[in-house]
Image (cartoon, rainbow, N blue to C red):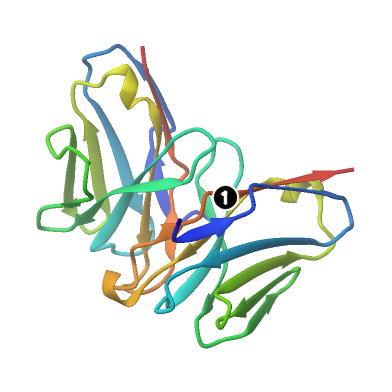
């Protein structure tokens, strides 16, 4: 199977919370990232978490990591229409020198007014 | 603000043309930069790792002679798509970490369309 898997689509209403899920297969993954891509643009680093952490919060964003289940989630509180984009989960592994990223296929988040 | 700049943002050219894409780190020195290719509605595929002062490292299946990479300075890497054909049309994105082991910052990408 794929190294990093994500659900492909999520639709929420403005003001609701969004939760985007990701699973990965390599237990040696060191850093796990969330990137945002708006149409026709590059990737914007949203947040990242080291593998020995369980949770990281940054303003409206909360990342939860369940290392036992190899499950990562991104929660966006009070979702706005400007949050509509594709969200990529990615990981790095020790053997890659911590720089080579392995991406999921991305989750398209659609926020309706 | 942006920390990695990519230029041009969009290129449309005829088949057989060679196209150069630039990737610059704006306020840091990048000994390593990465080049990705993204097909519509798909994830990013790593093409190669650009190393300042040495040869690039290409991923399996990526033609070195087709996608020439030059990393001549600590702030600039270039990707040249030689003799481009319609199947080379894609979205090309570069990235670089501020320091080894730190998160990568991405350029805004280059949309390449070969007619």
**Residue beneath the point at 58% across and 77% down:** A69
Label 1: state its secondary structure. Answer: loop
Q: Is the residue A35 above or below the residue B43 in the image?
A: below
Q: Which residue lies at the image location 89% right of the left edge and 57% below the top edge?
A: A15
Query: Is A53 situated above or below A57?
Result: below
Q: Where is residue B97 in the image (x, y as percent from the top left)?
A: 37, 65
Name the image quarter holding residue B54. Answer: bottom left
Q: Which residue is drawn at 36% across and 11% down?
A: B115
Q: Position of residue B102 (x, y in %)?
A: 40, 73
To which chain does the residue with label 1 belong? Answer: A
Between A9 and A39, the residue placed more toward the observer is: A9
Relative vertical location of residue A40 with respect to residue A5 in this rendering, above or below: above
A20, above or below B43, in the image: below
Q: Which residue is drawn at 56% across and 83% down?
A: A68
Left/right placement of residue B21 relative to residue A48 reads: left
Asked where in the image residue B65 lies, by quadrant, the reply is: top left
Q: Closest to the observer: A18 or A23?
A: A23
């Amino acid at each position: 199977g794929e190294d990093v898997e994500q659900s492909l689509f999520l639709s929420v209403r403005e003001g609701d919370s969004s939760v985007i899920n990701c699973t990965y297969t390599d237990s040696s993954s060191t850093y796990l990232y969330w990137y945002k891509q708006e149409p026709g643009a590059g990737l914007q680093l949203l947040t990242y978490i080291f593998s020995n952490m369980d949770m990281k919060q940054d303003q409206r964003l909360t990342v939860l990591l369940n290392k036992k289940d190899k499950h990562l989630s991104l929660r966006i509180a009070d979702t706005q229409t400007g949050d509509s984009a594709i969200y990529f989960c990615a990981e790095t592994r020790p053997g890659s020198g911590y720089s080579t990223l392995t991406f999921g296929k991305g989750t398209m988040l659609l926020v309706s007014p | 603000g942006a920390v990695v700049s990519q230029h041009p943002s969009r290129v449309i050219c005829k088949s057989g043309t060679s196209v150069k894409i630039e990737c610059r780190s704006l306020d840091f020195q990048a000994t390593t930069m990465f080049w990705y290719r993204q097909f519509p509605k798909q994830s990013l595929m790593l093409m190669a790792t650009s190393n300042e002062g040495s040869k690039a490292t290409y991923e399996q299946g990526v033609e070195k002679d087709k996608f020439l990479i030059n990393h001549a300075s600590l702030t600039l890497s270039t990707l040249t798509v030689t003799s481009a054909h319609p199947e080379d049309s894609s979205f090309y994105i570069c990235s670089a970490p501020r320091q080894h082991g730190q998160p990568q910052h991405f350029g805004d990408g280059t949309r390449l369309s070969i007619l």
